[in-house]
Amino acid sequence: MTDGRGETPRRTGMTEKCGVVGVSLDGRDAARPLYYGLYALQHRGQESAGIVTHDGFQQHSHVDMGLVGEVFDEDDLDVLNGATGIGHVRYPTAGSVDSSCAQPFSVSFKSGSLGLSHNGNLVNADEIRDELAAVGHAFTSDGDTEVIAHDLARNLLEEDLVRAVKRTMGRIHGSYALAISHDDTILGVRDPQGNRPLCIGELEDGYMLASESAAIDTLDGDLVRDVQPGELVVLREDGDGFDSYQLVDNENTAHCFFEHVYFARPDSVIDETLVYEARRNLGRKLWEESGVESDVVMPVPDSGRAFASGYADAASETTADGDLREESDDGVEFAEGLMKNRYVGRTFIMPTQSERERAVRLKLNPIKSTIEGKTVTVIDDSIVRGTTSTQLVQLLKDCGAEEVHVRIGAPEIVAPCYMGINMATREELIASDKSAAEIRDTINADSLAYLSTDAVANVLGNDRIDLCLGCVTGEYPYDIDGEATDRDVTRPELEGQTMHADD
């Protein structure tokens, strides 16, 4: 992403909310598999990490601020006993940037112990918190995960596990993929519209849940399938399979299309689609819709690589006008014209604008022989504020590019995300009040084009109504105060509502 990733507290781009994992094994301690699974999901959150396990008698927890490798050492893992557990990596969008909102969130109550890892964001968390506080629940954080944990704990006092989860699902409104531990039982829950990903994996000695299949691959497991929207999955004791309960059925889904565009690892399979192939196919569509004949096409590393590869492949087959190429015409050359310095940390600490601009040169260094004297097409997944895109275009022109054309493998981001992605406000989003032509002039590119929303839906094999497109349309699949909806949806009425879900 050209406008910063994972920067805090001065966040300059989009960052993922979280990654969750849960395991139930046959006699083997869960701590190290959870640790490796979190490492595989580190890209989904870099603010905090945590693991909760259960040994059949008591719950063990270690949660702290920092990267997975910073939070855990050998001694930490050695005391996390038990063959079941859940883990979490977090980047905050709801709640404070401190340890009070680090996860998994743990609570002990009359019916046992509860741990909860949450990826997503609730729309009505404040309403439920106020209701629970009024009847005596004490909250230690301002995050929405604690709200879910308290609501579920209360319901577990009156209902069995499945009914308690169903009751909570009937009260919370928004985006959630949950890994839950209730004593030594591990559960996975996906919200009724399936906004955030969650999948099931089979290991040699058990089963697991994870935000992405890459975590399953890391543990030499096999992807079984996605958790379905509105489904509860309960991993059996001793890793002996899992049970499924379809608690809510919705006519339409609201899968976040940006999981495929940017957030997920390219080697993950999300909703039965390999992310890498989806990005390549989005790149092919980008050529079909707005291809421009140039000497070279190059990605912004690493986010634009798969798009650029698909774009170049399509360009080798047809011209920008859609005609088949002659055999002697190779099309647009794919080249790595920008090298990324992987050892540069966060740049928000640089106090002056000139130093922040210098950070682009620290992170990306152009290969002059690939660029000088050539027309260049540079491909990325998004433009957020436009600041870094401006600097990147200037960098290429300073290196001798005759023309710089910018192509983006997603539609314009015109509105914020309320579903668990840290995204800029409307006032900060360059596309919220500027046309593509105006943005082109702002970043000083020779041309600029985005991928259409219809092309995204086509590549992902979905109708538009089955995707969450709020950030590119300004219409959302959830009932959010002050925002338009793209479907008939209302949040649950809590005041005076019976606390029992229908059987």
Image: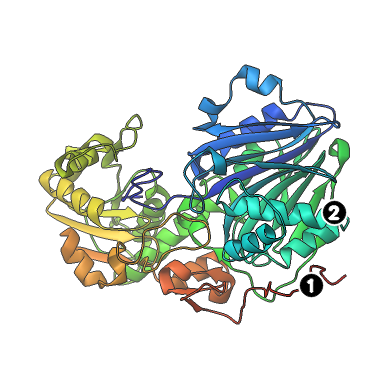
Percent across and percent down for residue 240 are 87, 40
Q: Residue at x 35, y 58 (%)?
A: 382
Q: In terms of secondary structure, where does tag 1 sit?
A: loop
User: Would you say residue 279 is visible in this rendering?
Assistant: yes
**In the image, farthest residue toward the bottom:** 488
Q: Residue at x 44, y 61 (%)?
A: 282
Residue 411: which quarter of the image? Answer: bottom left
Secondary structure category for the residue under label 2: loop
Which one is nearer the viewer's eye here, 7 or 1? 7
The CA span between labels 2 and 1 is 16 Å
Q: Residues within 10 Å of mark 1 (few under 14, many from 20)?
A: few
Q: Which mark is residue 498?
A: 1
Image quadrant in which you'd find residue 80: top right
Kindly indicate whether the residue at mark 1 contacts the one at mark 2 (C-beta within 8 angstroms). Answer: no
Residue found at x 71% / y 61%: 228
Q: Residues within 10 Å of mark 2 (few under 14, many from 20)?
A: some
Q: Residue 488 in the image: x percent, y percent?
A: 60, 82
Q: Is residue 291 visible?
A: no
Residue toward you, 130 or 448: 130
| Horizontal relation, residue 476 to residue 191: left or right | left
Q: Can you say which quadrant of the picture contains the C terminus?
A: bottom right
Nearest the camera: 374 or 19?
19
Q: Relative to 144, does residue 355 appear above or below in the rendering?
A: above
Left or right: 368 as drawn, with respect to 138: left
Image mark for residue 157: 2
**Mark 1 is on which residue type?**
Thr
Say whether residue 331 is left or right of residue 481: left
- Position above or below: 54 against 322: above
Q: Amino acid at mark 2?
A: Leu
Residue found at x 78% / y 55%? 154
